[in-house]
Structures are given as structure tokens and as C-alpha cells.
Amino acid sequence: MELKEQILNYIPFNEQEERDKALLLEWLSSGKEVFTRENKTAHFTASAWVLNKKRDKVLMIYHNIYNSWAWMGGHADGETDLLKVAEREAKEESGITDIRPISEDILSLEIATVSGHEKRGEYVSSHLHLNVTYLFEADEEQQLFVKPDENSGVMWIALDDIKNKSTEQWFIDRIYSKLIAKTKVLKK
């Protein structure tokens, strides 16, 4: 199923997702290139919410740009299969090699603002990440590796501890809280 159809079929979890869904569909229909960073205003990204087998922990990285513990993910860079992008990014950013989607359906939608920052010695202007999140599972016993150009830590974090680890209040309030709520429903 193509991304536009996946987003159209997605049932928003809350008001944030309802509003962001409409904007994501607008961007997809805009005729502008939204799958590469050539679009300096907004482009698609994919995130991986990676749970352990007990589904009581999530694999997170200490993100160097945001100075915070965060989910894994990255830019589509021309790829329109965002599930594949989320899986690739999780592997690259954490070192895990064995990961499987719990579902191929979208777990959440969000538009995240990215403040201007330096990356690889160049300034990147503030922009929007048109983000789609997918749900994965991985064995907690796998060896983890830091990706020094992006993160300085990789760790399994108990769901209830995420709010104490992340320093990005908007993500805690609007993103991680809904992902945790959705995860706890899966455990029942």
C-alpha cells in the first residue's frame, strides 16, 4: 500500500494526529518534492518505536543535536517506503541487526519542528519533519553500538522512565506519552 493510502486509512489517536494527518496529506498532494532534503521547508522522515519482547522497554538513543534521549529515525532520502526507512535507521543508529515490525501499519503521525543547527560543519535551517512512526520488536540481549556522528548513547529504557530521560518537553507531552499509551494497550 502506498504511503498516501496508508495515511488516509490511519485513524488519528488524538487532536495532534488529526491535525498533523491533514497537513501530511496536504504536503503529499502539493506536487513538491517531500521525500528528500532538497525541500528545505519540510520533508518526510520515519521513526522506529522499538520494544523489547516483554514490551516494557523501548530502545532509545542519546541524540547529539537535541542533547536528549530520543526515539530512532531519520530522513526518507528519496525512499517512499517509510517502514523500510524506519528499520534502516534503527539498525544504523543502535547497532541492532535483528529487528522485526510488530505491524506494517502506521503507529503514529506527527509533524516535528527542527530548530536550526550545525551538521557536519554546515548550518541547517529550521524546518519541519513530516514524520511517520512504525512499531518494531527486538531482542534486548543484542549488542548495541553508538553511531558517533549522530548519538552518544544507546539504551533500553523502561516505558515509565522515558519522561525522566528525555529533555524535550514537547516530545514527552505530545509524542512519547501517546506512544507509551499505545504500547500499554498492546501489552493487555
Image (cartoon, rainbow, N blue to C red):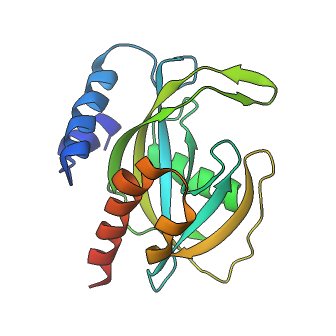
Quadrant location of residue 132? top left
Residue 150 or residue 114, whichever sits in front: 114
Q: Is residue 153 left or right of residue 15?
A: right
Q: Position of residue 141 (x, y in %)?
A: 67, 83
- Which quarter of the rendered picture does the C terminus lie within? bottom left
Question: Measured from the top left, where is residue 147 in percent x and y?
Answer: 77, 53
Where on the picture, by quarter, is residue 179?
bottom left
Can residue 187 be spotted in the picture? yes
In the displayed structure, 81 sits above or below 153; it is above
Quadrant where the image shows the N terminus: top left
Residue pictured at 77% horizontal, 65% vertical: 145
Identify whether 48 is placed above or below 128.
Answer: below
The answer to whether residue 142 is above or below residue 27 is below
Closer-to-camera residue (176/91): 176
Q: Residue at x 76, y 22 (%)?
A: 122
Q: Is residue 86 left or right of residue 20?
A: right
Position of residue 93 in the picture relative to residue 3 (left or right): right
Residue 23, by quadrant, is top left
* Residue drawn at x 56%, y 30% as measured from the top left: 115
Residue 140 placement (x, y as % from top left): 61, 81
Question: Can I make out residue 95 in this image?
Answer: no
116 is higher (above) or lower (below) than 156: above
Question: How many numbered circles does the render carry?
Answer: 0
Between 158 and 139, the one lying in front of the other is: 158
Name the residue furthest top.
31
Q: Residue at x 50, y 74 (%)?
A: 161
